[in-house]
Image (spheres, rainbow, N blue to C red):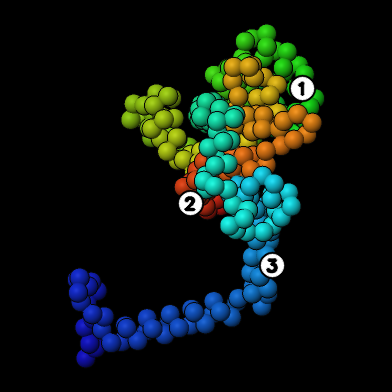
Amino acid sequence: MAKYVPTTLQKGDELPPEIAKLVRESAKKKSHGDSSRKSPYSGLWTVVLSLISVVYVIPILLVIINSFKRKAYINKNPFSLPNAKTIVDPLFFNYTSGMEKIGFTSAFINSLIITVGSVIVIILCTSMCGWYITRVNSLFSKCMYYLCVFSMIVPFQMVMFTLAKTADYLKLGNPIGIIVVYLGFGAGLAVFMFCGFAKSIPIEIEEAAMIDGCNPIQTYFQVVMPILKPTCISVAILEAMWIWNDYLLPSLVLDKTKYKTVPIAIQYLKGGFGSVDMGAMMAMLVLAIIPIIIFYLVAQKYIIEGVVSGAVKG
């Protein structure tokens, strides 16, 4: 008579010996198959990519190291570690000195307002636009899509003179007004990404929401927007890195006598006859890159989720 094997297991139960043996054999075969499929060059690729990552990290380390040196020793020995002779006293003198010279606090607040406000407006407007383009099949929506894509290939230098004149005429030379300008320049890439992801969303989900009584606005915020979350995070990181580090656009649009962003303020450490306070500049560069690095590290897992979910949909 065949031995009875329970089809369900309770918590704490052990597998029958026959099933446990089959599971072990299956796991052994799977691990052997995975190792056999492993590329013979995987170790080489690991070494190559590790070396490339070191090349990218070295400049950041040099900036951090030199931010604690005396100004006279940065140009002489930029690659040496700080020692008792070259290190500044007190330790954070370059940081405090640089913050006082350029008014770092006000510049940081301006950059924060511009970056956060621009990213929120770009995500909100372009996600709605991308959803509309994918769901409304009309000549207008197609023209809107191709105009957004075309804006990605237009060189900024081609429009910057007209942009500066228009922004000055419309009184956009302030941290709130420049958000409108960033919306125009950041919409192309964002709409392109949202359209690609929105096409993979089953329309039946939106139809079910409509049957439950949701209007288009409710459908977007309660159904579509949560599904677009990985793409929103990816767009937010790309746009935030661009806007936070941007120098040319704020220098053309903002009234620099009243408003300075961090990249613009750092340039004021250059004195007359080409003199530069390298110690203070290195310290301010460290303070400038810390917020965007923290934001990227916090949101990094959402980028991976966005890439994976976008790859398996549709």
Quadrant of the snapshot with the N terminus: bottom left
Closer to the chain start, of discs 1 and 2, is 1
Quadrant of the rendered image containing residue 236:
top right
Q: Could you tell me residue 246's position as x and y percent?
A: 65, 33
Q: CA distance from mark 1 to mark 2?
A: 36 Å
Image point (69%, 46%), residue name: 72
Camera-side residue: 124 or 97? Answer: 97
Q: Report which residue position mark 3 lands on.
A: 48
Q: CA distance from mark 2 to mark 3?
A: 24 Å
Q: Could you tell me residue 65's position as x and y percent?
A: 61, 53
Image point (50%, 49%), residue name: 297
Instruction: Identify the element where label 3 is drawn.
Output: helix
Check if mark 1's residue and mark 2's residue have beta carbons within 8 Å.
no
- Checking the image for residue 170, the label placed there is none
Q: Report which residue position mark 2 lands on.
A: 301
Three-letter code for the amino acid on which mark 3 is drawn: Val
- Checking the image for residue 159, the label placed there is 1
Q: Is residue 237 above or below residue 273?
A: below
Q: CA distance from mark 1 to mark 3?
A: 41 Å
Instruction: Identify the element where label 1 is drawn.
Output: helix
Quadrant of the rendered image containing residue 285:
top right
Closer to the chain start, of discs 2 and 3, is 3
In the image, taking residue 33 as reference, residue 278 lies left or right, namely right
In the image, taking residue 181 as reference, residue 305 lies left or right, namely left
Three-letter code for the amino acid on which mark 1 is drawn: Val
Camera-side residue: 132 or 191? Answer: 191
Camera-side residue: 94 or 39? Answer: 94
**Crowd around label 3: few <14 · some 14–19 · many ≥20 (10 Å):** few
On the question of residue 313 being in view, the answer is no
| Dot in front, 2 or 3 | 3
Q: Is residue 71 above or below residue 207?
A: below
